[in-house]
Amino acid sequence: MEFLPELGPGYAARAAAVGLHPEDVTENFILGSGHGGQNRNKRSTAVQLVHRTFDIEVRCFRKREQHQNRVEAWMILLEKIEERKIDIENALARQEYVETAQKRPRSRKGKEKMLGEKKQRGEVKRNRGSL
């Protein structure tokens, strides 16, 4: 299965960059809803794309024609996958930053401040004893 030619040559490159392959997508044509009259009520103009790997579902029924909805649904699917990839990369980068920050030794001033607070807390606890 190939991408639609109306999506343009840049679409295939963007799809390959995020790992979107047409074989992983199930395409269904369903009845739309809303404005559009008899054309929309009797014909399957709405498009539903389900990507099995990323578990993303896109439905598009904005236009009156099936082909226009199909092109728009593929564009929306690519954008959603790109967003998910960015979210995953940001989460991994954040996790890596947290791990390196936890392993980093304290500065001299930070260590002195921490020890001073511990000393003060120890004094408070010592003063709680019976008189």
Image (cartoon, rainbow, N blue to C red):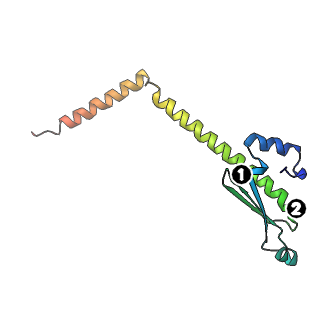
What residue is rendered at 67% in x and 50% in y?
A: 54
Circle 2/circle 1 CB separation < 8 Å: no
Q: Is disc 2 placed on a helix, strand or loop?
A: helix
Question: Which residue in the structure is indicated by mark 2?
Answer: 67
What residue is rendered at 44% in x and 23% in y?
A: 107
Name above or below for residue 73 compared with residue 9: below
- Of mark 2 and mark 1, the one earlier in the sequence is 2
Q: Which mark is residue 116?
A: none
Percent x, y of residue 20: 75, 46
- Mark 2 to mark 1: distance in Å? 20 Å
- Report crowding for label 1: few under 14, some 14 to 19, many 20 or more residues within 10 A (C-alpha): some
The front one of 131 and 91 is: 91
Kind of residue at badge 1? Lys
Percent x, y of residue 61: 80, 66
- Report crowding for label 2: few under 14, some 14 to 19, many 20 or more residues within 10 A (C-alpha): some
Question: Which residue in the structure is indicated by mark 1?
Answer: 80
Q: Name which quarter of the figure residue 19 lies in.
A: top right
Image quadrant containing the C terminus: top left
Name above or below for residue 44 compared with residue 12: below
Percent x, y of residue 99: 50, 33
What residue is rendered at 21% in x and 37% in y?
A: 125
Q: Name which quarter of the figure residue 37 lies in.
A: bottom right
Pair 2/1: label in front: 2
Name above or below for residue 7 compared with residue 93: below
Q: Name which quarter of the figure residue 47 lies in.
A: bottom right
Relative horizontal placement of residue 61, taking residue 110 as reference (left or right): right
Residue most extreme to the left: 131
